[in-house]
Image: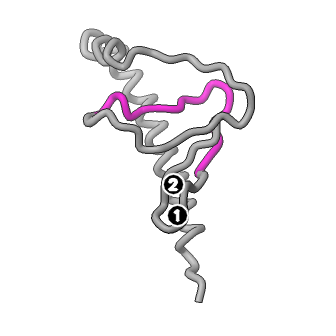
Amino acid sequence: MALDFPVPGRGDIGIETIGAGGMLGWSWIFPPYRWQFGAVAVRRTATVEFSAEGVRRLIESDDALGRQLTLRLMAVVVDRLQASRGRLLELYGHPTR
């Protein structure tokens, strides 16, 4: 999956590619539960989708599971922020004259 985000005046900018075993979405765990990035399958892809409400209920009802899922989700969030930062620096770090 090719992950992108909209940049005003530049359109959708690719930030990273998510391969086998990677996690695409995390916005479902934090209010307001809206997508922050877009994604396009670059080749035939098999995916697994979970019920966001169901997973949030599991996190609330099982502290150990909730802790593990939260740690793993936060690792994905940090990765996405770093990738986004890197792409923005590539785009705007050296302004054209």
Q: Is residue 26 magenta?
A: yes
Q: Amino acid at mark 1?
A: Leu
Which residues lie in the magenta part? 15-30
Whether 68 is drawn above or below 84: the answer is above
Residue extending farthest to the right is 43
* Residue at position x 36%, y 29% in the image: 28
Compared across the picture, whether 53 is left or right of 16 comes to left
Whether 19 is drawn above or below 50: the answer is below
Instruction: Check residue 84 in the rendering and tell me which mark sits there, or answer none.
Output: 2
Compared across the picture, whether 49 is left or right of 71 comes to right
* Front residue of this view, candidates 85 and 45: 45
Image coords of residue 90 (percent x, y): 59, 67
Magenta highlight: main SS: loop
Residue for badge 1 = 88
Mark 2 burial class by Cα count in 10 Å: few <14, some 14-19, many 20+: many
Q: Quadrant of the C terminus?
A: bottom right
* Residue 45, image quadrant: top right
